Image: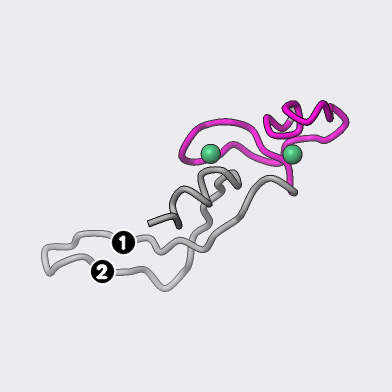
Amino acid sequence: MTCYDCTLQDRTDTAAIGVCARCGLAACRDHARVLVAQVSQGNGMGPSTGPVAARRFVCTACHTAERAY
Ligand SMILES: [Zn+2]
Ligand SMILES: [Zn+2]
């Protein structure tokens, strides 16, 4: 799969390393952010957060948008 942002820049030699969790587009290492996400689960006593952090893969466009407000 080719990174979407790279194709916009006429770069087709980069391989996408993942798919953005928000927009679903493929992104390469340069055009994506791997964030730490907490996994929360409702167990009847309010949401609890697990001890192990999960990962969340988003492209730079969505990462910027999420931090814009
Ligand atoms: Zn890229
Ligand atoms: Zn995205």
Res 5 → quadrant? top right
The kind of residue on which mark 2 rests is Ser
Q: List the single residue furthest toward the right.
A: 13
Q: How many marks?
A: 2
- The one nearer the camera, 17 or 53, is 17
| SS majority, magenta | loop
Quadrant holding the C terminus:
bottom left
Q: Is mark 1 within 8 Å of ligand 2?
A: no
Instruction: Work out how far the residue at label 2 is from the one at label 1, CA to CA, in angstroms.
Output: 5 Å
Q: Answer whether residue 8 is magenta in the image.
A: yes
Please say if the residues under marks 2 and 1 sit with CB atoms less than 8 Å apart.
yes
At a point 47% along the width and 69% down the height, the residue shown is 52
**Does residue 52 appear to the left or right of 20 in the view shown?**
left
**Does residue 38 appear to the left or right of 40 in the view shown?**
right
x and y percent of residue 28 in the render?
Answer: 73, 41
x and y percent of residue 61 in the render?
Answer: 56, 43
Q: List the single residue furthest toward the bottom.
A: 51
- The magenta region covers 3-29
**Up/down of 17 relative to 24, above or below:** below
N-term-proximal mark, 2 vs 1: 1
**Does residue 50 appear to the left or right of 2 in the view shown?**
left
**Up/down of 19 relative to 37, above or below:** above
SS for dot 2? strand
Q: Dot 1: within a 10 Å radius of its alpha carbon, few (fewer than 14), some, or many (20 or more) residues? A: few
The residue beneath circle 1 is 40
SS for dot 1? strand
**Up/down of 40 relative to 28, above or below:** below
At a point 67% along the width and 38% down the height, the residue shown is 27
**Does residue 63 appear to the left or right of 8 in the view shown?**
left
